[in-house]
Image (cartoon, coloured by chain):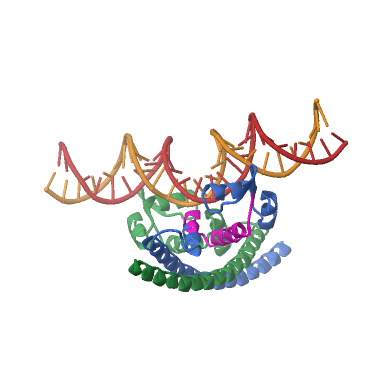
Chain colours: A blue, B green, C red, D orange
DNA sequence: TAAGAGCTTTACGTTAACGTAAGGTGCTCT
DNA sequence: AGAGCACCTTACGTTAACGTAAAGCTCTTA
């Protein structure tokens, strides 16, 4: 897959793909000087984009990607990554809970806001 | 409440509080030259910090705060803020759903990772 | 009275995650 | 041959959300 096809498929810019490559998050092969993205690259990009939506930094994402690819390193390094992922899980669950609360609150606020709009329109009409 | 007490209560720096004030997110009164934070300021700060945890920008948060305080402005301006909040709600719900998926996936990955650690330890022991 | 603690303002510095412009290469189409 | 893509590299620019340093008030405590 060419870089342009990747951009359209994932709705990202070419700059972004090259940036991720520079950060060693993806490693497309070269055909001449052009980049070719494999299925593996696409799977990794998908994970990167999801991670971003949850507020993970690219550095954190890089560590999680290591976990997915059973690192190439030593057991201790791998254990460290495992711990990081566990901590992130706790954070994610807490975040979801809090998000649920915020959603309910915002819903209530919207009902209230709707009421405000109606009375405001009545007032405008009366003037 | 003094600025120092606020910092300890909310675990933020004084710089952050002054920064939020410059952005007109909170407006503490002055006693001489010192800032004094009211209950209202504390409520707003709480909302600001929650918003941040969900990835809202300070500018978006400022708009949501307007909603909470029924703006002082015109109906059209208020209606616009109302629309923004409705859009954010949709995003938040989608985000929660996606977060749930990611949580389950990460859980599975952790089970798998745990298994990896065990076999790696066996391998280490065998060497 | 001198030192410190705690607050203040002003203003330049920092980091992440790209955007954007400049200039170059290689292939194809006319 | 020249024009035009589509890609490349290099490198400076940008924005948000503060950090941090410098310099100055005010009150109290040794």
Image position of B108 (left or right of B9): right
Q: Nearer the viewer, residue B63 or D10?
A: D10
Residue shown at 43%/72% (left/top)?
B114
Q: Quadrant of the C terminus of chain A?
A: bottom right
Examine the rendering and report whether any part of residue B95 can be seen: yes
Which residue is depicted at the point 42% across and 55% down? B28
Horizontal and vertical percent for residue B66? 56, 59
Q: Nearer the viewer, residue B71 or A40?
A: A40
Location of residue A30 in the rendering, given as x and y in whole percent from the top left corner: 62, 47
Q: Position of residue A1 (x, y in %)?
A: 68, 54
Circle count: 0
Q: Is residue B21 above or below residue B85?
A: above
Q: Is residue A105 visible?
A: no
Q: Quadrant of residue D24?
A: top left
What's drawn in magenta, residue-wise?
A36-62
**A61 part of magenta stretch:** yes
Identify the main secondary structure in magenta. helix
> Where does the image place residue B16, in percent across and percent down from the top left?
42, 52
Residue at 39% in and 72% down: B118
């Amino acid at each position: 897959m060419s870089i342009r096809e990747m951009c359209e498929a994932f709705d990202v810019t070419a700059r972004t793909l090259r940036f991720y490559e520079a950060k060693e998050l993806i490693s497309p092969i070269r055909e001449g000087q052009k980049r070719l993205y494999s299925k593996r690259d696409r799977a990794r990009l998908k994970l990167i984009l999801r991670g971003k939506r949850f507020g993970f930094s690219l550095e954190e994402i890089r560590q999680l990607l290591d976990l997915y690819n059973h690192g190439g390193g030593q057991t201790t390094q791998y254990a460290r990554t495992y711990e990081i992922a566990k901590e992130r899980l706790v954070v994610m669950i807490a975040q979801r809970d809090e998000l649920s609360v915020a959603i309910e609150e915002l819903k209530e606020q919207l009902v209230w806001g709707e009421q405000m709009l109606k009375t405001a329109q009545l007032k405008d009409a009366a003037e």
